[in-house]
Structure formats: structure tokens, C-alpha cells
Image (cartoon, rainbow, N blue to C red):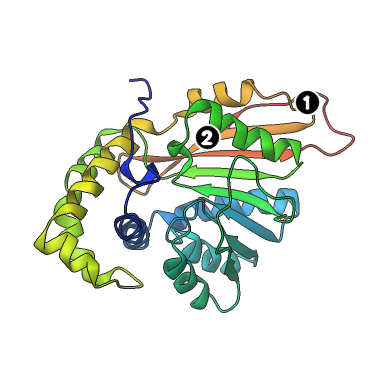
Amino acid sequence: MKRIHLVELEDLPWFPGILRDGGTSYLALALRVSGHAKLLAPKLGEALRATGSTEIIDLCSGGGGPVGILSEALAADGNPVKIRLTDFYPNVPALRHTAEGSGGRITFEATPVDATAVPASLTGFRTIFNAFHHFRPDAARRILADAAAARRPIGVFEVVSREALPLFAMLTAPLVVMLTMPFWRPFRWQWILWTWLVPVMPLFVLWDGIVSWLRVYDEDELRALVAGIDAPDYAWEIGRIKLGDAPAHATWLIGRPLAPAGAVTASAGTSG
């Protein structure tokens, strides 16, 4: 099926921050428990080595997502990097919580950062984890084009794909939200009200989860995005990563500037 871009509640400017922050904290916990985040580390480490990058600018960080896990995995594999977390709607308590537990490897921006126009002061390898689907094709292409124009490498990763198993997981989200809410960090007492007494949080996570599943770009759609970018000195690679033994895959896109003596046309390929 083709990608369908419905409305996620957390994308709406008027949506209550306490609910948005709960959703991002839930997703951060889910990534830690599932172990899927760690499976992205080899591909990211390979891209960091290929570009000589020692700093990551993480865009659309939400509540910190998989960055803490990836930071540890990269360091263990001989790729220690500094990571700067950013978001257009920064969940500052969650970002601070992630940074404080990182041993100095992770910092964050407390002010909004637009992924389609990243400030020049934020240098480094750009990453987007599980958030690229929030953007319609025009905006998604602008994110990639901005990286190419600035000659910054970028990595886009999504652990959800339009496969049956991830959709089933989305349908069970309301129960999982109600069971795991006490373990979200940093904890906010208002979540008790909106999860157990008035179950708005479970319904919000269910809706946004299903819409996310419908929105995720597959490999062919990612190729179509980069094909529309005029960047002759920039290379693109696209592929999938199998998520353990489960019948599910993560998708990835890596963009990087070519060396001055490199090819004169951008390339696109797949692997994984």
C-alpha cells in the first residue's frame, strides 16, 4: 500500500504539552525495552566512520528516543561521539534526563530547532530517529536538501515499517501505555490523571501510532524523495535492517557529501 499522510495529534501546535511529552517518553521506554535501537548502531557507526564524524546533531529528538542507547553502543564499538539533542517542540525535562545520564556525551538545545533549516552553528552528522514520517514529502525533501546544501551528512532511521507485526503492536498500545506509565521518565504526576482516571493518553498513543504506521516512508518512497534533490556532489544510500527474528524491518537513509575528487552525480542505492 502507498503511504497515507493523516494527522498526528502531537504535530498540532495546540496539542497539550503534557500529553505530547507523555507520548515521547512512552516511545523512549518502548525503544529501550524492545532492543531495536541497538540494532541501528552498526549502520550508524559505519556512516560515522565513512564521514569522519565525531559529533551528532539529532533532530526531532522527542523525549531522547534511542540516542542514549546508541551512544553507549557506539562507544562500546570504538565510535565515541558527542550528541546534541534538538526538537521543534523540545521536551526539556526528558532531554535533560537523557543528557544527565550520559556521562557528558549528550547535551541538548532547550529552544526550538527546525529540521528543515538547521542553524549553521549546529555542525556535525545529522540524525533523525523515528520522526521522519512526521513530514510530508515537500518538507521531508527540504530536510534532506538542507543537509546536502550545508554539506552535512545525515542519517534517517525508522524502526517502524508498514508491515503487519508493527501494526499489531500499535493496536496493543493502549494496554501497554496503562501498564508502563509509572516507568516513564522523568515522571510527571499529571500522567496518572490522563492515563488511569481519564484515559486520554492511551487513545492518543493509539491514534498517533496507527497514523505513524501509515505515514512511514518505504524504500521506494525514500528514493523518490532524493531523486528530486539537486545535489550533484552528494551521495545517497537507502536500505533496510531486519529487527532480530521478528518479521519486521527498520528503514534507513544515509546522505553524505562526496569528496572533492569524487563522482559528479549523486548516487542512490540499497543495502541491508
Compare residues 50 and 120 and report the one nearer the observer.
Answer: 120
Q: Secondary structure at mark 2?
A: strand
Kind of residue at disc 2:
Gly
Q: Residue at x 18, y 60 (%)?
A: 194
Q: What residue is shown with label 2?
A: 239
Residue reaching furthest to the left = 197
The picture places residue 241, in percent across and down from the top left corner, at 46, 42
Q: Is 152 left, or right, of 198 in this rendering?
A: right
Left or right: residue 4 versus residue 115 is left
Residue tagged 1: 232
Relative to 271, is 135 on the left or the right? left
Crowd band around label 1 with a 10 angstrom C-alpha radius: few (<14), some (14–19), many (20+) = some
Give the image quarter of residue 93. bottom left
In front of the other: 127 or 94 = 94
Q: Is residue 15 above or below residue 217?
A: below
| Kind of residue at disc 1 | Pro
* 1 vs 2, front mark: 1
Res 11 quadrant in image: top left
Rounded to the nearest whole Å, what is the CA distance between mark 1 and mark 2?
Answer: 21 Å
Q: Position of residue 257 (x, y in %)?
A: 76, 39
Q: Secondary structure at mark 1?
A: loop
Q: Quadrant of residue 20?
A: bottom left
